Image (cartoon, rainbow, N blue to C red):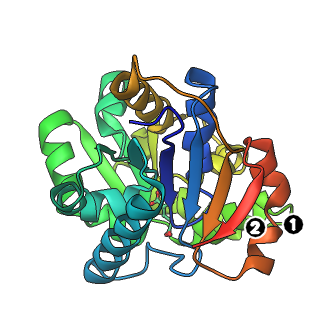
Amino acid sequence: MSPSAPILLFDSGVGGLTVLAELRELLPDAPVIYAADMAGLPYGTKTEAEVAARVAGLLGRMAERWHPRLICIACNTASTIALGMVREVLETPIVGTVPAIKPAAEITKTGTIGLLGTDSTVRQGYVDDLEREFAQGKTLLRYGASGLVALGEAKLRGEEICVDEVTKAASGLVFQPGGEDLDTVVLACTHFPLLEPELREAFGKDVTFIDGAKGIARQIARLVQGQEMEREVPDFAVTTGPMDDFEELTEAFAAHGLKGLVHL
Ligand code: DGL
């Protein structure tokens, strides 16, 4: 493998930057391509078939074009729907992003955990399996908060955001039966950590937020351990959508070490 082979991080939008930020801490020298399926955003309100087809098709094209050493699907929605299928069709090692139910179950004191994800993620069988495997004897309350995705995108573009959707998301968990006992909330969408201060305010009580970004970065670092890495070109971001829209994110990308913008 070429030392310049990149790690490809893929999301529907800018949410995966929360994973990239953690990856930079562990692997500052790793060549990275960040890919955002802006033409497909948002995934959270699409059908499983639509998401699976987009993700498999796009990752196949990008793997052929850039020969990544590893692909990270930095999106809970895409991972809970399509991880197994994409692993079957691509030879590149693939790391997924799945709701951090396991660590949440380990730290909750009350035994009541909230799960905020996109509408699509919270209904996935993958989440049922994680609950069965890691949260036995705990209460897992789920709420689909797809509206927060656009807010995360807007915040990163430096736009003013209205927090009504954030309040709705917090209420959607707290006002479920048993919700008063919540002490831990899984942010099961890579866009949501971008809104952590607003979410903290909206919950208005002491809850611990937990997301998978650090764990995913550690997993990537483990898988590429010992591999030679050398940047031949500056890291860049790729979009499937219009370039002028993508250019509004130039600053946010630059802050994550992504110096060029490319259209797929
Ligand atoms: N960032 C994605 C996730 O982690 C979803 C955003 C979307 O709805 O496209 O689930």
Task: Identify the amino acid type marked 1.
Answer: Glu
Q: Position of residue 23 (x, y in %)?
A: 55, 32
Dot 1: within a 10 Å radius of its alpha carbon, few (fewer than 14), some, or many (20 or more) residues? Answer: few
Inspect this view and state whether residue 136 appears. Answer: no
**Residue 76 rendering spot, x and y as whole percentages:** 39, 55
Residue under circle 2? 154
Question: Which residue is found at the position 68% from the left and 44% from the top?
Answer: 233
**What is the quadrant of the C terminus in the image?**
bottom right
Secondary structure beneath label 1 = loop
Question: Regarding mark 2 in the picture, which secondary structure is present there?
Answer: helix
- Closer-to-camera residue (263/11): 263
Asked if the residue at tag 1 contacts the one at tag 2, i.e. Cβ–Cβ closer than 8 Å, the answer is yes
> Would you identify the image quadrant in which residue 177 lies?
bottom left
Tell me: residue 166, above or below residue 206.
Answer: below
Label 2 Cα neighbours within 10 Å, binned few <14 / some 14-19 / many ≥20: some
Cα–Cα span, label 2 and label 1:
7 Å
- Residue 114 appears in the picture as rendered: yes
Q: Residue at x 27, y 67 (%)?
A: 123
Residue under pointer 1: 160
Residue 30 in the image: x percent, y percent?
57, 31
